Image: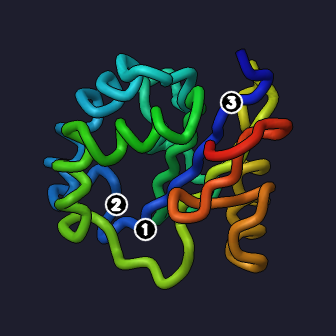
Amino acid sequence: MSDYELAQLNIAHLLAPIDSPLLADFNANLDRINELAEQSPGFVWRLQTEEGNATDIQDFGEEYIVNISVWEDVASLQAFVYKTAHAQIMSRRKEWFNRMGEVYTVLWWIPKGHQPTTSEAKERLESIRKLGPTSDAFSFKNPYPKPGAQGNP
């Protein structure tokens, strides 16, 4: 059993306000996809408000939505992102989000039980944007093993 878990942040730049008709279908699927995440193997925690999602959190600006979650490992997160209904919904992202010209997703290892803040996530995003993937801020393409572990994440 490891003393570390994987944190992830991704942000999206909205084409319109979150409550606009343009984002109605995105919003209609949000609870279902969040529930799917919570039921996925390896899921630990996700940032959410009392309403059960994070769309009201505007720490990256009111035109952005933020997703922060914690997983047991990279493989668990990858399985959810690419092999569930999440992938089908995200294949429609051009309908709801602007294309981002810079990195908008970052992964990093945290001590088991820690719940990352938006401030911490911002620092990790800035790190990968400035330095590229490092052991402190990395991507699915360039994952780093858990601290103290050998081999693949």
Left-right relation of 39 to 68: left
The mark that comes first in sequence, 1 or 3, is 3
Asked if residue 46 lies left or right of residue 88, the reply is right
Q: Position of residue 81 (x, y in %)?
A: 36, 44
Residue at far right of view? 148
Badge 2, how many Cα within 10 Å: few under 14, some, many 20+? few
Q: What residue did someone put label 3 on?
A: 5
Kind of residue sitting beneath label 3:
Glu
Q: Which mark identifies residue 120?
A: none
Residue shown at the point (22%, 55%) measured from the top left: 23
- Disc 1 vs disc 2: which is toward the camera? 1
Badge 1 marks a residue whose secondary structure is: strand
Q: CA distance from mark 1 to mark 2?
A: 10 Å
Which numbered tag is attached to residue 13? 1
Q: Which residue has dot 2 on it?
A: 17
Are discs 2 and 3 less than 8 Å apart at CB?
no
Q: Secondary structure at mark 2?
A: loop
Residue at 85%, 37% in the rendered image? 148
Res 114 → quadrant: top right
What number of labels is visible?
Answer: 3
Name the residue nearer the viewer: 64 or 145: 145
- CA distance separating discs 2 and 3: 33 Å
The residue under label 1 is which amino acid type? His
- Give the amino acid type for the residue marked by disc 2 in the picture: Pro
Q: Nearer the viewer, mark 1 or mark 3?
A: 3
Q: Earlier in the sequence, mark 2 or mark 3?
A: 3
Question: Residue at 29% across / 50% down in the picture?
Answer: 19
Q: At numbered mark 3, what does the secondary structure look like: helix, strand or loop? A: strand
The crowding category of the residue bearing disc 3, from other C-alpha atoms within 10 Å (few below 14, some 14 to 19, many at least 20), is: many
Residue at x 37% of width, y 22% of height: 40
